[in-house]
Amino acid sequence: MKLTYFGHACFQVVANGKTILFDPFIQPNPIAAGKVKISDVQPDAILISHGHADHLADAVEIAKASDALVVANWEIIQWLESKGISNTHPMNHGGARSFPFGRVKMTNAIHSSSFFDGTYAGNPGGFIVETSDGSFYYSGDTALTMDMQLIGQAHNLRFAVLPVGDNFTMGPADALKAAEFVAVEDVVGVHFNTFPPIQIDCESAETLFANAGKKLHLLDIKQSVEF
Ligand code: NI
Ligand code: MN
């Protein structure tokens, strides 16, 4: 599996020959500006964790351009359909379903979820994705939760994608605990350094993980890592 980072919590994973894009937020991202073009992204599927603009801003444009299948909670799918997106599939917490690119289970997240105008966007979530090339977990924006232990017990994950920016989500120390709960050695850190409240000391975060025998990957924009 090859993961490529597009900044903030936007990344894609190519697995089993399919490209899965998560939480599209590229054009309004100050640190991705000029580095990533919408046309760089040609997903087969788009998975959206919750309704906040920093996870959804480019979803309509990319979905229209790619005709990718969009998977998200019921409320986000209703909203996307109202914007003319028709290749969609709604899910909710605890449910799993097999798609051409792999099997997705929607997980709980401790966060909030609303659209740009403040209207309700369903509950925030994350995803376990199982493919023939291996499985991984993207938590979405969340606090550390004991529920993550259930994920580690039930799934053999190759890596996890976890927020590390603190303030709105887990910081590095809680993300390390989450990595222990979901039983992974490799974590791709997201949701950091985009805005002043989520600035972190990358070197000390990487050291924290290394001292626990784990690897925190903090990627540059458009940098890739293979798992
Ligand atoms: Ni959020
Ligand atoms: Mn966010």
Image (cartoon, rainbow, N blue to C red):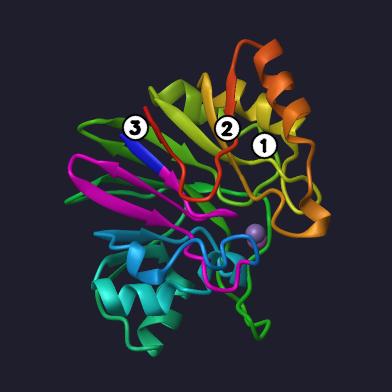
For residue 14, above or below residue 177: below
Can I make out residue 110 in this image? yes
Mark 2 nearby-residue class (10 Å; few <14, some 14–19, many ≥20): many
Q: Quadrant of ligand 2?
A: bottom right
Residue 142 in the figure: left or right of residue 188: right
Badge 3 marks a residue whose secondary structure is: strand
Q: Over which residues does the magenta segment extend?
A: 4-29
Q: Earlier in the sequence, mark 2 or mark 3?
A: 3
Q: Position of residue 21 (x, y in %)?
A: 37, 56
- Looking at the image, the residue that sits furthest to the front is 34
Q: Is residue 152 magenta?
A: no
Badge 2 marks a residue whose secondary structure is: helix
* Residue matched to label 3: 135
Which numbered disc, 3 or 1, marks the residue closer to the eye?
3
Q: Are marks 2 and 1 in contact (CB under 8 Å)?
A: yes
> In percent of the image, x 79 and y 48: which residue is there?
199
* Residue matched to label 2: 148
Between the residue at mark 2 and the residue at mark 1, the CA separation in whole angstroms equals 6 Å
Q: Position of residue 67 (x, y in %)?
A: 23, 73
Residue 145 bears which disc, if any? 1
Between the residue at mark 2 and the residue at mark 3, the CA separation in whole angstroms equals 15 Å
